[in-house]
Amino acid sequence: MELNGYFIFIAITVIGFYLLDVFSNLLNLKALKPELPSEFGDVFDAEKYAQSQAYTRTTTKFGLLESTFSLIVFLLFWWLGGFQWLDQWVRGFGQGPIVTGLLFVTVLILASQLLSLPFNLYDTFVIEETFGFNKMTPKTFAADLVKNLILSAVLGLPLFALLLYLFENPTFQSSAWVVAWVVTTLFQLFLLFIYPKWILPMFNKFEPLEDGELKSAIESMAARCEFPLTGVFEMDGSKRSTKSNAYFAGFGKNKKIALFDTLIKKHTVPELVAVLAHEIGHFKKKHIVKSLVLGILQMGLIFYLLGLFMNNRGLFDAFGVEQTSVYLSFIFFSFLLSPLSKLISVGMAIFSRKNEFEADAYAAEVTGTSDHLISALKALSKDNLSNLTPHPFYVFINYSHPPMLERITALRAL
């Protein structure tokens, strides 16, 4: 490989982001305080608060161990000529550029899954088990893994093959990035349509919520907010974890509400309605549409830049690969793009946190009080062992939602 500008830039970026991650995590650990924030005194006792801090320490240290391992494996694979070796091996089958590219990517994905498997197993069956979250059996874990691999192959490989074709075909030339952008956007919209109807039921059971106080309250709230609700379902989240959640699924005017069974068991009807009013707030404030549009625009920028660096000789030299190819251009460009991707990620996190405050305010307005959402947020913090005192820099880099204490403070200010 050649120690050119691309090599130096990517090496500094990869190692630099790793060090940034370590630094932010260490700050986050240092920010853990033995004193329980007074706001949570009515929910947490000393034992539960100590457990939440222990959970944060354990998951943080384990995450750092995994990221360190991943960095070492990547650098060794890169600096020992792994990309060149793998490229020669897949080319040895004598297939065309598209099939060769699909084979290359498949090998990388399977290798990545294999290397991360021990960490996933330990996280699920040791850490999550220790802290009382895990309800997943080895059978369910294996089934999820197989299903995810099949979905990746069925959905991801045809899309990647089409993208390879577009950039390989001289007919498109300089317009390949535009066509790829349009195709990927349509694919993303297609996934939004099929995800709740076909993909989610592969992993969980969705039963219509039984008639009663909760269903009536939810339907009443949806009608008051002029929210196009077409169904309320209870999802068997307890099949995998004791953690709670709720979300909307659906596309266009057909919106469905999915409530984890764990959420229903642990919260009062007013709390659940407040949580769902928050989610309706995202819809009414057009946060979902705005995020989708921003994502599409980002995708366009990425494909444009990809077109500029397609089959870049200097980039291939930096990775020690002799023959240029479209499929490796995709992979190498992703490393070159990482600083921009990080900036976009931080920007989207800031945008997301702003949206959460707005949705909270909307929920307080339509329910007539902030008390129910506050009590729901407190209960979720306790049940999920949330970190109540995250460091501001860690929040800035990583959090898509504001810390619970900031959300509750904002709600009280209303």
Image (cartoon, rainbow, N blue to C red):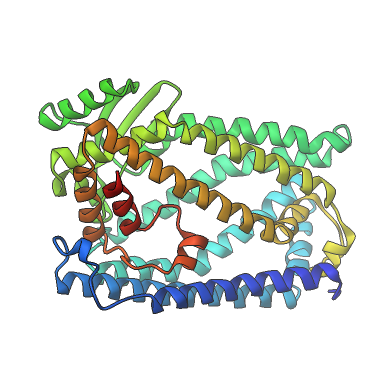
Horizontal and vertical percent position of residue 194: 46, 31
Judge by depth and name the residue closer to the eye, 222 or 314. 222
Horizontal and vertical percent position of residue 229: 31, 23
Residue 111: quarter of image: bottom right
Question: Residue sitting at 47 percent across and 35 percent down?
Answer: 288
Q: Is residue 281 visible?
A: yes
Question: Residue sitting at 41 percent across and 31 percent down?
Answer: 283
Horizontal and vertical percent position of residue 112: 56, 64
Query: Which quadrant is home to the N terminus?
Result: bottom right
Judge by depth and name the residue closer to the eye, 222 or 320. 222
Residue 392 in the figure: left or right of residue 48 = right
* Tally of marks: 0
Query: Which quadrant is home to the C terminus?
Result: top left
Residue 94 vertical placement versus 129 (above, below): above
Horizontal and vertical percent position of residue 86: 73, 65
Judge by depth and name the residue closer to the eye, 210 or 386. 386
- Name of the residue lying farthest toward the left: 212
Residue 92 vertical placement versus 97 (above, below): below
Residue 90 in the figure: left or right of residue 192 = right
Q: Is residue 258 visible?
A: no
Residue 248: quarter of image: top left
Question: Residue sitting at 78 percent across and 48 percent down?
Answer: 305
Residue 134 vertical placement versus 23 (above, below): above
Residue 345 in the figure: left or right of residue 412 = right
